[in-house]
Image: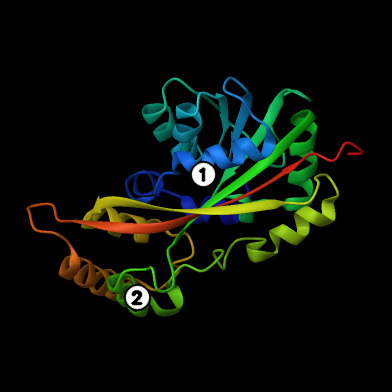
Amino acid sequence: MVDPRVARAWSGDAELYERGRPGFPHEAVTIAMNGLGLRPGARVLDLAAGTGKLTRALVAAHLSVVAVEPLESMRAVFTRVCPSVTVLDGTAERIPLSGGSMDTVFVGQAVHWFVVPVACREIGRVLRSGGGVALLRNDWLEGERAPPWLAELRAVLGSHAPGEEPARSPYGGRWKQALSDSSVFEELESASVEHEETVTVDGVMAMIASWSFLGTSGVERARLTRDSERVLRAHAGPGAEPTIAVPYRAQMWWARRAERS
């Protein structure tokens, strides 16, 4: 059964998610693959695949991919944009795959929604001996390397600006400890890589609209939308569809399954 919080958060937002959310850079997938000793052709699962943002990077890395996604609206978009990949109806807590069938389970921007102890056991079940898990997420670049307009946009969004994890998710920033406490995996290793996506202003606005944690009133959401678009258009390039370069830091964590599990 899909967590009602997930269903409420993403109801009707699949197209916004597809238009606004960034993909994952090839380098991030390669780092995770190298950390787990994966070679092209390895059998991997994209768990909670959404519209296939991470799936496309996995396919480009020549991995043999199957996807699992609990929401019908997301699967509908996924099937359109990733027609060569099978996507199954399932959850992290109930994966519709046989035991020992996967070399690695990848998760992009979703682990904070999992019931982590249950999901860890399920992920461990579908992994072969020596298999592993790789967790990826994109965050806006912060600090001195971030462009001034991004600081302006964060100021407009205030407490609604994205943090490490959406506040409404079940585990938020506690998932790393929950994963460690499960004893299913060895110690997490980590790395990060910066990347940039040039998108239209409308694309950035779609990303903001897709945030599941932006649970504001209609009036407040309208204000945030108006003020965010003002900042973006002030810094975007010219043209009928002005674009802006959005910098991200892709973070990766990976671990092998503990053999005792």
Residue with the mark numbered 1: 28
Name the kind of residue labelled 2 in the image.
Ala
Q: For this view, does 29 lie left or right of residue 13?
A: right
Q: Secondary structure at mark 1?
A: helix
x 44%, y 67%: residue: 214
- Mark sitting earlier along the chain (1/2): 1
x 46%, y 67%: residue: 162
- The 10 Å Cα crowd at callout 1, few under 14, some 14 to 19, many 20 or more, is many
Residue with the mark numbered 2: 151
Whole-percent x, y for residue 122 in the image: 76, 38
Whole-percent x, y for residue 191 in the image: 59, 53
Where 124 sits versus 175, above or below? above
Where 252 sits versus 256, above or below? below
Residue 91 visible at all:
no
Name the kind of residue labelled 1 in the image.
Ala
Q: Quadrant of the C terminus?
A: top right
